[in-house]
Amino acid sequence: MSRSSLARVRRIVVKVGTSLLAPPGGGVHPRRFSELASEIAALMDTGYEVVLVSSGAVGLGLRRLGSESFPESIPERQAAAAIGQIDLCRRFERAFARRDRLVGQLLLTHRGLSERERFLNARHTLHELIQAGIVPLINENDSVATEELRFGDNDQLSALVVNSCGANLLIMLTDTGGLYDRPPGQAGGRRISEVEEITPQILRIAGGASSRLASGGMRSKLESARVVARLGVPTVIADGRRRGILRRILEGDDVGTFVHPAENQLSARKHWIAFSQKTRGTLRLDAGAERALCERGGSLLPIGVVGADGKFQIGDLVSCISEDGREIARGLTSYDATETDVIKGHRTSRISELLGYSNGDEIIHRDDLILL
């Protein structure tokens, strides 16, 4: 897919960064809420389906509290988020009401989407809202989350929402023109128009978060774009301060940074397995197991495992690491950590002898295994 084909997409996830709504210098940008609502409503009037993922709850909450400093403790941030979520939703509700559009709010977390039943429930709710012409407004549930407040899961959440709602495009709006060929703060950087593949080199030039309130930063956005790419979905990272930016993106204009979809795409189910869950352990593989997985598309057998780390249970997501330390795959394990430690390095014929029972020949079956 290229920029010129973006006009053909129909379902879009738009992610809005904290810096656009509650800038680090203080105050709120009320005009930004109005402009976003106008752009999104105009797209919907012409047949596009839009899901809005918005950061900013913590920032808006701190403004309402009159706080001039960013809280260090998680409970303080959660309290700010509880106040800010109401403010965030109210501002968008009023902005869309002026365009005769209703807003339906969903509070989600990474952990919630890792449970298959909750993931499917979120999918059904999103589809109902979209079919009814209502704007789904998704916030990170920061008032109860902990890891999300630490690691910028707001960007990662938007990538998971793409899978949940079956979107064709992710647009991430921020306060920069896209990815530049020099780290933020260095003069003379040039915008990178397109990225074919998000490599370690690309991540290195991305830098970190732009402010304490903006927990993600460009690196987080690129990592989320890489997750979306495995679904066969492109991402555009662009400057949300520019008027008409959504329309320009969909018209194929050279704005922001366009991240191409990956060639080795995953089904929706395998994508959920790989990225909607947190890994609970690590399996260290020998060279033979790596070849079996990567070259022959096989399952992971006990004989190819040389070590197991973590306290994972049956059905947990584990990471598969090569001899040189690369993560080459993830998958759902058929044995827990204790069982895996007993049978690692042995042939499958000895599983029953070693454990007194068997959950199958594979530690990870190929249907539950995803190559990275």
Image (cartoon, helix red, strand yellow):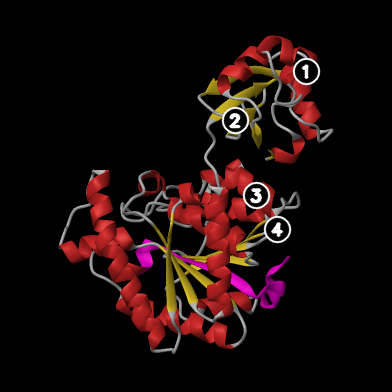
Q: Is residue 359 magenta?
A: no
Q: Answer few, some or many: residues within 10 Å of disc 3's Cα (few below 14, many 20 plus, some between 14 and 19).
A: some
| Numbered label attached to residue 348 | 1
The quadrant the C terminus occupies is top right
The quadrant the N terminus occupies is bottom right
Residue named by callout 3: 271
Secondary structure state at the residue bearing disc 2 = loop
Q: Earlier in the sequence, mark 1 or mark 2?
A: 2
Q: Separation of disc 2 and disc 4 at Cα?
A: 30 Å
Q: Amino acid at mark 1?
A: Thr
| Numbered label attached to residue 314 | 2
Seen as rendered, the residue at the extreme right is: 296
Of marks 2 and 4, the one in the foreground: 2
Q: Earlier in the sequence, mark 2 or mark 4?
A: 4
Q: Give yes or no for contact between labels 1 and 3 (Cβ–Cβ under 8 Å).
A: no
Q: Give yes or no for contact between labels 1 and 4 (Cβ–Cβ under 8 Å).
A: no
Question: What's drawn in magenta, residue-wise?
Answer: 1-20
